[in-house]
Amino acid sequence: MFVTLDGPAGVGKTTTTRLLRKFLAQRGYRVHATTEPSHGALGETARHNTEIYRGYTLACLVAADRYHHLETEVRPYLESGHIVVCDRYVASSFVLQRMDEVPLPFIEAINAAADRPDLSIILQAPPAVTAKRVAARGAHDRFHSGEDSSRQESKLYEEAARRLTWWRHPIVAVDTSEASPVDIATYLTGRIADLIDGPTQEAATA
């Protein structure tokens, strides 16, 4: 099963990915956690050089890394029976590349052949909350410069979720502003287990 997590900076993607890996493994599943941009050469170039590469160049670099990531890491782990949990995927391109002034049709075109996840998780929180978290930890790149950029990012993720639904991605949206990371990961672990094994008797009759 291929599970992706997207959402604005500061929303808790990395923490949720780590906890999902732990909780799913505790249930006996084989789990592989990964991230995009990947830790391969293309991904590291994209991740650490957003001041150098912009617009169409960065969009193409991210898409190229995505296809290589799918070919060399995601698909092999899926074929060997793992749940693959990926921190950032296509939804992030719909958001960050648009913040970089790349037209949506171009972003759609270069990502059209990317594998469809079995579950696309969109984490959200109010922009004031995510901006505060980013300020506390420090921004990782030029896309995050305060509450205004967090507000723009949040709005674009709402649009991305609608776009992915149109693309037939199974979407689940979660607000991370109130619930604890453990509660969020526990809920998502249950959703993933239900998709793999079917709902429990108790859930089926609730």
Image: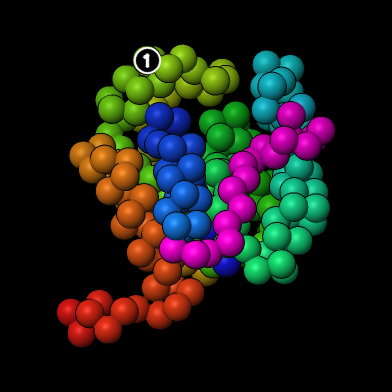
The image shows residue 41, relative to residue 33, as above or below, that is: above
Answer yes or no: is residue 109 visible: no
Label 1 SS: helix
Locate residue 162, reporting x and y percent: 43, 57
Q: Residue 132 sits in which quadrant?
A: top left
45 on left or right of 116: right
Locate residue 200, reporting x and y percent: 31, 79
Locate residue 95, reporting x and y percent: 52, 39
Q: Which residues are magenta?
A: 27-44
Residue at screen point 76% across, 27% down:
45
Residue at screen point 31% across, 49% down:
184
What residue would you read off at disc 1?
136
Residue at screen point 45% across, 78% down:
197
Residue at screen point 43% across, 45% down:
19
Q: In this view of the protein, which residue sits in the foreground, 138 or 113?
A: 138
Answer yes or no: is residue 118 visible: yes
